[in-house]
């Protein structure tokens, strides 16, 4: 038996023993996932245990090096673990901005000290991070950000405001873009890390159209941050910010992949019913769903092909913008069709029958997919410029 | 399996692309069309397909073939999609080769497969009877007649049917099952009408009126050809999907070059964001098709009986993408895109035909729904 095969066998056996049955059901919404952090309220003992046992093996971040709390798995082994988790229907034990965004950025650009301080806490779900990028006047044109950091010998003093900061009110630390020089737009930005409990940090939740409030206005009033919390050189944060964005885009694009959730066609078969020939009673919806599922299959394979090409040294980093665009639009389309298939039942906003309006609220939440992490229009700009080489883009 | 071509496949892709762009670029099709060539393809070129090994790609080794798979056949088809080269590759080297290799008797295989590998013959597959692809509704009748058969019915959109030396005809027996018969088009009772098509595609309508066929012309089992036919059609579908992909690639390259070169309002038209975004979306659609088609080809090579769903997805997706590519291609070229002299119109016409061939996006979306249980 090859090493990979014995790894597969051991992994399956371990997952079967250690993944609680409650954690073998798909995650139904953002609030159903495990985010970790100092103040996280676990929804069940199973959720807590699953995060803990996986964290101990480093399998919350399987491909990170072991010294930083990761699993130290090769690409092939990580793929086996993912496949086995998928086969058993295991949920991700932990999801977080630390895993998706800050971790990769620190691995590439952090000092050894920064990596050793922050990465293991991300891996074990001890510290939850939020992303302080957008400001009221700096959205798509992010580099125009104005939150000001005064540089002193051993610390910075930060003043300003961020907006749309997802989970700022629940996060423990923030990775934040601040202006340390006004001389030039892109080369006056620094990438800093600080504790959200620092004096002078405050947040105000914003209610979304889904009725939930996972994002905030975030205010900084003379917040003191040690110099050693600057990642990379002073005024050279933009490169790191962009590197992190490609990871964010890949992650958001990933929502185009349904994962273990029931196929849309079957959801619709249950809600609108089938005729004598086994066809969906709504003929137009049937065609729309079939065409959606075709695009969904293509997207899943393109994600896979992109990984395989990168592995063979044939990748183009701007492809993350293509995947982000398509994955976001696909997920919006999925939930338009889900809402349509659910019909009047899907309009219920509260109550047990609708699980407090899961369909309606998720449908609305997905509208943000093509805005967060850079809008669809911005992704198309990137594709036009970086992949197609079109002028002036 | 990784969704990338392996080294040999990459080499095949480069060599077939180079061969066709040198030996048979789009001008080759134009010449055949404008001279109203009675054959519609260049027989010398077809023989060169044998020298290159292209016509032998799916033929088993025992019969002089290369015994390669759907992936390799599609690499050739993709290149043909780029140059629009007319050849009997699909009819003979793909559809007929697979049908005979799967269902043929030892004698039939020994007679026909080496000839296919050597590009010495043209064999057509006759399935469609209506203007839309509907293989479930085949009505041609195969009636037992002594030790042999009598064939009655009409077929349409028979690729290379006007010059084929043999036709594999799908017909129904009295019990309702499907039967494949190897018919000599020169037999009494066969009428052939070449159809002159929008894209100069080589095809014909065939009529069979009481055509008498010997027992040795039965391909496979009488009344039980359904599974073989499904496999042959699915192989054809995914190969055509690859051809559509090659076509979309070629059109997109032409269009992208034009966006960079054509100037209006003192700038390249590719600077206009309205066009940039449409080009970016088209690029993404083409990449989606590429990944899905390769996935379907690998599935076809792994186990054709399990590949039905992904083949349907791939053909549907390729149809939609190629359709968008030619529409955007013509539009973004402005007036020049409407001229016969410029190649893009030829691509638009070919895309239309390849969409109809072996089921359009709607046909395959319906299959996807049916296989998905809705
Ligand atoms: C659910 C959600 C969560 C978020 N979480 C975070 C977070 O955690 N941290 C954080 O920092 N930010 C977060 N954001 C903010 C997000 O990154 C910004 O909203 C986004 O970058 C767009 O900026 P904006 O809202 O200012 O829109 P604007 O930039 O004002 O855009 C408005 C419209 O103009 C279009 N537009 C702008 N420029 C161009 C152009 N050059 N070409 C064509 N069209 C253009 C846009 O595409 C959009 O349609 C979140 C947003 C959402 C919706």
Image (tube, coloured by chain):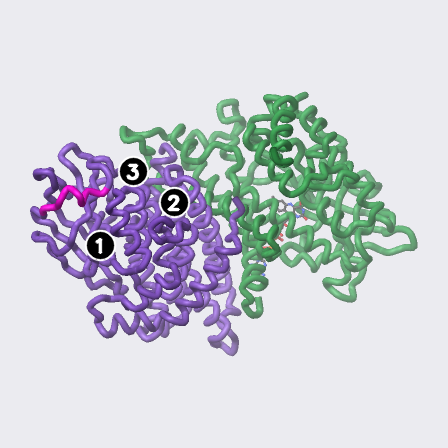
Chain colours: A green, B purple
* Residue under disc 1 on the same chain as residue under disc 2: yes
- Ligand 1 closer than 8 Å to label 2 CB: no
Which x, y percent locates residue A150? 85, 55
Residue name at image x 82 percent, y 57 percent? A234
Estimate how packed mark 2 is, as few (under 14), some (14 to 19) or many (20 or more) residues with alpha carbons within 10 Å: many
Residue tagged 1: B157
Report which quarter residue A378 is drawn in: bottom right
Q: Secondary structure at mark 1?
A: strand
Mark 2, chain letter? B
Q: Position of residue A190 (x, y in %)?
A: 78, 55
The quadrant of the picture occupied by the C terminus of chain A is bottom right
Circle 3 packing at 10 Å, graded few (<14), some (14-19), many (20+), is few
Q: State the quadrant of the N terminus of chain A.
A: top right
Rounded to the nearest angstrom, the CA distance separating label 1 from label 2 is: 21 Å
Viewer-closest of A216 and A268: A268
Q: Do tag 1 and tag 2 residues touch (Cβ < 8 Å)?
A: no
Chain label for disc 1? B
Classify mark 3: helix, strand or loop.
helix
Residues shaded magenta = B212-219
For the point 37% across and 44% down, the residue is B312
Cβ atoms at labels 1 and 3 below 8 Å apart: no
Q: Which residue is mark 2?
A: B311
Is A320 displayed left or right of B206 in the figure? right
**What residue is pinned by disc 3?**
B227
- Asked if B15 appears above or below A153 in the picture, the reply is below
């Amino acid at each position: 038996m090859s090493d990979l095969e014995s790894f597969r066998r051991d992994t399956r056996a371990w997952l079967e023993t250690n993944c609680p049955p409650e954690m073998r059901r798909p995650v139904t919404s953002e609030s159903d996932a495990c985010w970790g952090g100092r103040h996280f309220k676990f929804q069940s003992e199973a959720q807590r245990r699953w995060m803990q046992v996986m964290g101990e093996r480093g399998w919350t971040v399987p491909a990170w090096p072991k010294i930083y709390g990761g699993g130290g798995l090769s690409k092939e082994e990580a793929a086996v673990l993912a496949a086995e988790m998928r086969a058993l229907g295991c949920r991700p034990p932990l999801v977080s901005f630390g895993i998706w965004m800050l971790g990769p950025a620190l691995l590439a650009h952090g000092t050894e000290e920064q990596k050793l301080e922050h990465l293991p806490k991300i891996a074990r779900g001890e510290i939850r991070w939020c992303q302080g990028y957008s400001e009221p006047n700096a959205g798509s044109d992010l580099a125009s950000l104005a939150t000001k950091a005064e540089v002193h010998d051993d610390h910075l003093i930060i003043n300003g405001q961020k907006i749309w900061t997802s989970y700022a009110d629940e996060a423990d630390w923030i990775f934040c873009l601040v202006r340390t020089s006004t001389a030039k737009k892109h080369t006056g930005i620094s990438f800093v890390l600080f504790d959200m409990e620092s004096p002078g940090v405050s947040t105000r939740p914003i209610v979304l159209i889904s009725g939930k409030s996972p994002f905030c206005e975030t205010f900084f009033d003379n917040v003191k941050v040690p110099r050693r919390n600057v990642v990379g050189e002073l005024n050279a944060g933009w490169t790191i910010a962009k590197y992190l964005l490609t990871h964010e885009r890949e992650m958001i694009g990933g929502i185009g992949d349904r994962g273990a959730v029931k196929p849309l066609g079957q959801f619709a078969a249950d809600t609108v019913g089938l005729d004598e020939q086994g066809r969906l009673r709504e003929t137009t919806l049937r065609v729309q769903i079939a065409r959606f599922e075709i695009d969904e299959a293509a997207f899943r394979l393109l994600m896979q092909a992109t990984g395989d090409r990168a592995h063979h040294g044939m990748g183009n980093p701007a492809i993350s913008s293509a995947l982000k665009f398509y994955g976001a639009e696909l997920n919006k389309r999925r939930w338009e069709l889900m809402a349509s298939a659910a019909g009047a039942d899907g309009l219920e906003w509260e109550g047990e029958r609708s699980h407090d309006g899961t369909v309606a609220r998720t449908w609305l939440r997905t509208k943000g997919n093509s805005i967060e992490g850079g809008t669809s229009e911005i992704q198309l700009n990137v594709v036009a410029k970086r992949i197609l080489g079109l002028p002036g883009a | 399996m990784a969704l990338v071509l392996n080294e040999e496949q990459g080499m095949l892709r480069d060599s077939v692309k180079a061969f066709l762009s040198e030996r048979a670029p789009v001008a080759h099709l134009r010449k055949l069309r404008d001279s109203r060539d009675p054959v519609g393809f260049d027989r010398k070129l077809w023989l060169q397909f044998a020298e290159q090994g292209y016509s032998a790609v799916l033929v088993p080794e025992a019969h002089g073939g290369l015994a390669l798979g759907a992936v390799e056949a599609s690499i050739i088809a993709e290149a043909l999609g780029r140059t629009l080269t007319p050849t009997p590759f699909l009819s003979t080297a793909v559809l007929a080769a697979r049908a005979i290799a799967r269902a043929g008797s030892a004698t039939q295989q020994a007679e026909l497969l080496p000839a296919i590998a050597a590009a010495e013959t043209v064999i057509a597959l006759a399935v469609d009877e209506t203007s839309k692809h509907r293989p479930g509704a085949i009505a041609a009748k195969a009636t037992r007649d002594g030790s042999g058969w009598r064939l009655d019915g009409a077929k349409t959109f028979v690729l290379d049917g006007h010059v084929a030396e043999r036709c594999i005809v799908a017909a129904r027996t009295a019990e309702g099952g499907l039967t494949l018969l190897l018919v000599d088009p020169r037999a009494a009772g066969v009428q052939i009408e070449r159809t002159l098509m929008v894209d100069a595609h080589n095809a014909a309508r065939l009529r069979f009126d009481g055509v008498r066929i010997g027992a040795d012309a039965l391909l496979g089992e009488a009344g039980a050809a359904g599974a073989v036919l499904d496999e042959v059609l699915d192989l054809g579908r995914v190969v055509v999907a690859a051809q559509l992909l090659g076509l979309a690639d070629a059109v997109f390259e032409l269009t992208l070059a034009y966006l960079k070169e054509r100037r209006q309002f003192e700038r390249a038209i590719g600077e206009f964001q309205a066009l940039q975004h449409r080009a970016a979306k088209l690029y993404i659609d083409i990449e989606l098709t590429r990944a899905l088609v390769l996935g379907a080809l690998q599935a076809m090579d792994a186990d054709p009986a399990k590949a039905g769903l992904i083949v349907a997805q791939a053909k549907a997706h390729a149809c939609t993408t190629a359709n968008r590519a030619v529409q955007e291609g013509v539009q973004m070229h402005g007036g020049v895109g409407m001229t016969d002299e410029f190649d893009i119109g030829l691509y638009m016409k070919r895309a239309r035909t390849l969409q109809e061939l072996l089921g359009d996006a709607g046909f395959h979306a319906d299959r996807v729904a049916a296989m998905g249980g809705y």
